[in-house]
Amino acid sequence: MRDDRAPDATASAASSEALDVLVVGGGINGAGIARDLAGRGWRVLLAERDDLAAHTSSSSTKLIHGGLRYLEYYEFSLVRKALQEREVLLRSAPHIIRPLRFVMPHDAAMRPAWMVRIGLFLYDHLARREVLPGSAGIELRDSPYGRPLKARYTRGFVYSDGWVDDARLVVLNALDAQSKGAEVLTRSTVTLAQRDADGWAATIATPQGERRVRARALVNAAGPWAEAFLRGVARPAGGELLATKSLRLVKGSHIVVTRRFEHDHAYIFQNPDKRIIFAIPFEGEFTLIGTTDLELPDAALDGPAHIDEEEVDYLCEQASRYFEQPVTRSDVVWSYAGVRPLLDDASGDPSAVTRDYLLETHAEGGAPLLSVWGGKITTFRKLAEDAAELIGQLLGETRAAWTEQALLPGGDLRGWIGAPERPDADFARLLRAIAQRHPWLPPALALRLARAYGSRIERVIGNATALAGLGAEVAPGLHEAELRYLVREEWACGAGDVLWRRSKLGLHYSEAQRQAVEDWFQNKEETNSCS
């Protein structure tokens, strides 16, 4: 049974003298691995140089999906693994992960209908489905799903996948890791990891100063920087080469535009270059369109990724092939880009590079090292489970897996709704329960808080019995009580952490309103690990 009580920070702090495992990287893979290891009873420290999910893990298309297009590249094992994980994740966090139906308008010039039907049949049957409905054909001419489209698209298909708040997924894994005894350090850079026969001696630059730790094993989950970490930070005991794999860094960019349709389904569009893009309902008022696949020429990353003008034009052009109302540059209200660290498999086309992961271990001649190469957000839990199994073997202490049936923080709704039924129905029941218990919460605010925090909502609102009890409204719908919670319990250090990762409120605010949140952080009295 999950326990969503607040973790005791003192009791959960990992010893600075002796760790079992040091995990480098606070994206979804690093946070997931730290959670799994801590849940098996090992002493774990997670070090992230920036904010949790600051890079790739907050820049995804925000889908929990098998990857329909990967079937064309015969990635059946990857698709099956991802499809199996969809329903595991839907049950684990029904507040931040929810079912989403997709509409695929049929364009005979792209792929014949029989090929699409076969692909969808495989998609429906490669793994067992209990929550998500299967695929079906659809007439678009008289359907609400056809109205936003050009008249030439008369037939199509619908199928199921899932939507996830990707950055919050990372935070929930870090919270669960901490509740099980791990220490989570953000804004903390591992500057040196020296290997010897018995362990790793690491130096970490934290906001509080330099810290030295010793770990029996090291996990390199640095994402796009995994190869660079092995070449520049991790020092071998002898002369052996630790970096034996190469990454292909592929940038994926997205645009957010004014809302293009009123219904709750998403679209998947086939492009003449044989790629696909998605158009997804986003934040109520917008449509999210993406992604691109642009290979980066340099192996090193000097800073955050940004969308190029050519990528904006590409996404606008491809979406406009389908939507009756063209998508233009002037419609773009926000954009973001992330770098996917894909394992180099010698594919010529970046879109064809495998999204599967490889866990590479080094144990000869020194303490164990595990490096994570590649991966996708949908399979993070399975990746973490496999990584924990390997670490256990390397340490000679194999311990039982546990995450498949576990719930993430906020995902255990039983205290609000009783026995769970279906994840989507359970969340609707949670909303009704919140409205009954806290009728003073405005419906829009209750929905947003429930989506973000699930059963932990009362950790945010505390003992308030009226809106005034949440403190000053720093920006529309954002009160001091929530900001204090995010600082106290979710490692938020600045306005960007709150407005663009732990929420997407920044998309709804003016520059002055975003500045008001920044001013609050500059003047806050709360203290945390940021300073």
Image (tube, helix red, strand yellow):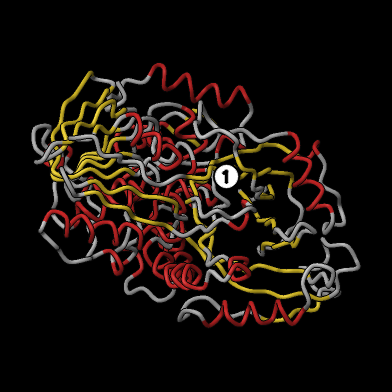
Q: Is residue 54 left or right of residue 332?
A: left
Image quarter where the N terminus lies is: bottom left
Asked whether residue 423 is in view, the answer is: no
Q: Residue at x 27, y 45 (%)?
A: 219
Q: Is residue 242 left or right of residue 436?
A: left
| Residue closer to the observer: 448 or 63 | 63
From the viewer's perspective, is residue 318 above or below residue 186? below
Q: Is residue 168 left or right of residue 455?
A: right
| Residue closer to the observer: 207 or 407 | 207
Label 1, secondary structure: give it: strand
Image quarter where the C terminus lies is: top left
Can you tell which quarter of the image residue 321 is in? Answer: bottom right
Can you tell which quarter of the image residue 45 is in? Answer: top left
Residue 248 placement (x, y as % from top left): 52, 45
Residue under label 1, please give it.
250
Q: Is residue 93 left or right of residue 158?
A: left
Q: Residue furthest right?
A: 151
Residue 379 placement (x, y as % from top left): 42, 61
